Amino acid sequence: MFDGLTRRLGDTVRKLRGVGRLTDDNIRDTLREVRMALLEADVAVPVVKDFIDHVRSRALGEEVHRSLTPGQAFIKIVHEELVHLMGEANDALRLNTAPPAVVLMAGLQGSGKTTTAAKLARYLKERERRSVMLVSADVYRPAAIDQLATLARQVGADFIPSDAGEQPAAIAARALKEARVRHADVLIVDTAGRLHIDQEMMDEIRDLHRVLAPAETLFVVDAMTGQDAANTARAFGEALPLTGVVLTKADGDARGGAALSVRQVTGAPVKFLGTGEKTDALEPFHPDRIASRILGMGDVLSLVEEVTRKVDTAEAEALARKLKKGKGFDLEDFRAQLRQMQNMGGLAALLDKLPGAGVLPPGAAARVDDGQLRRLEAIINSMTPQERRRPDIIKGSRKRRIAAGSGTQVQDVNRLLKQFTQMQKMMKKMGKGGMKNMLRGLGGRLPPGLG
C-alpha cells in the first residue's frame, strides 16, 4: 500500500533532509511535488488542497526558518499533517455498553463485508477475549449466509442461522434476542450490499439500525476504488450515523488515496485495514504509523506487535536456550524460522514495515516472492533427519536426491545451503550477545525511542 506515494514523497523529502536553508522558492517547489504525489495517489482534490494549504502556512512560518535543520523540520510538518489528516490516533471500537454490543456492517456488494465480519470476530476473540456471535441479514444472496456460516466455524465464533425467506429486520431482532439469552459480548450483523447505492438499500439499512441500536456502525469499502471509496462512504454517512470505516483490499492498493481521503470526506475515522484474504489479515488503523510508512520511515511498532502476537514464544525461547548453550543452529531450526516468517504474512508484509523500504526501486516489494519460502521449506522437508541436523554431510548425490524429492534443481539446494550458512553465522553472533550490536546497527533507521 502507498507504494507510489511513498516513492514520490520519499524522493522529495530526501532532497530536503540535508538542506541547511529553506527559501520560499524551494518550499513552493517541494509543495508542488507533494501535491502531484497526492493527486497521483488518487487522494480527493479538496483534501489535497486543504493539506497543502496547512503545510504551506506552517512551512513558510518561523517553525522552519528558525530551525537548525530546516529540511527535517519541514519533513516533521508533513508527517504531522498526514497524521492530522487521517485522524491523530487509532480510534478503537467502542463496545463498552450493556452486552451484547452490536456491530452493524454496511457497504456495497463486493466490498468484502462478509469476510470482514469474520475477520472482526476473530480479532475480538483473540485480541480482546470477547465472546462473539455472527448473523447474516443478507436475504438476497443465499450464498452470503452460507459463506458467513463457514467463516464463523473457521474463526470459532457462534453463528445464528438465518433464511432467505425472512425479513432482514426480523432476523436482526431474533439475533439480538438470542445473543442476549446466550450472554454474548458482541453481535456482528452482516447486511446486504448492492452494486450501487439505491433508496431501497438505504431504507433497509436504516430499518436495521433502528431495530439494533448498534454500538458501532462500520462502513466497509474497497480501498482500491480510490476517490470513489470516499464518495460512497459520504453517501452512506448521510443515511446512517457511521462510527467508523474499514478499508478492505489495502494490500492490493498501491496508491492509498482512500486512506488519506475518507476521514475528511465523511467525518468518520478509519478503524481497520483489511490486508489480505486470511481471517487474521485485519489491522487496526494507526494514523501516526501509516504516516511513517508513507514517508519511508517504516512501521516498527506494528512489526513488533505482530512478532509478539504471531511468533511461537516457547519455540523462540527453546532456540535461544539452545544457542546460549553453544549448540549449533541447524536446518530444523532454519525450517522453524521460515514457518514463523510465513505466519507473519511473508516477506512482502515484513518489508512494508521496515524502515527504509521506501527507497527500494519501484516495484521491488511486489517482486518479493513468498513462494520462495515454501520452496526452501520443501527442500528441507526432502532431507533426512540426520541431514537436517548435520548439513555438512550434504554432498553431490545427496543434493541430487533432495532436489528430486522436492521438485527443485541442485542449484536451488546449493542456494539454500548458502543462505543457511549465512543465517548460522548470524545466529552464532546472537548466541554470544550480538543481538544488541545488531539492533544498534539498525538504530539510525528506527523511529525515535526505538533505536
Image (spheres, rainbow, N blue to C red):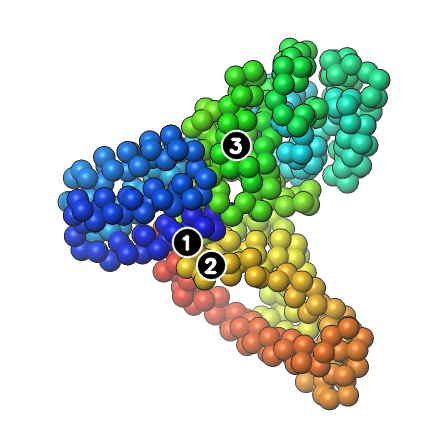
Residue that mark 2 sits on: 362
- Residue nearest the observer in this picture, 270 or 436: 270
Where does the image place residue 378, in percent across and percent down from the top left?
A: 74, 68
**What secondary structure is marked by label 1?**
helix
Q: Which residue is mark 1?
A: 7
What's the CA distance linking mark 3 and mark 1? 23 Å
Sequence-earlier tag: 3 or 1:
1
Picture layout, residue 127 above or below residue 1: above
Q: Position of residue 315 (x, y in %)?
A: 67, 60
Residue 228 — which label?
3
Disc 2 residue type (three-letter): Pro
Of the two numbered discs 2 and 1 on the same chain, state the one appearing first in sequence. 1
- Earlier in the chain: of badge 3 and badge 2, it is 3
**Figure check: 194 above or below 65:** above
Query: Type of residue at label 3?
Result: Asp
Classify 10 Å Cα crowding around label 2: few (below 14), some (14-19), many (20 and above): few
Cβ atoms at labels 2 and 1 below 8 Å apart: yes
- Measure the alpha-carbon separation of dots 3 and 2: 26 Å
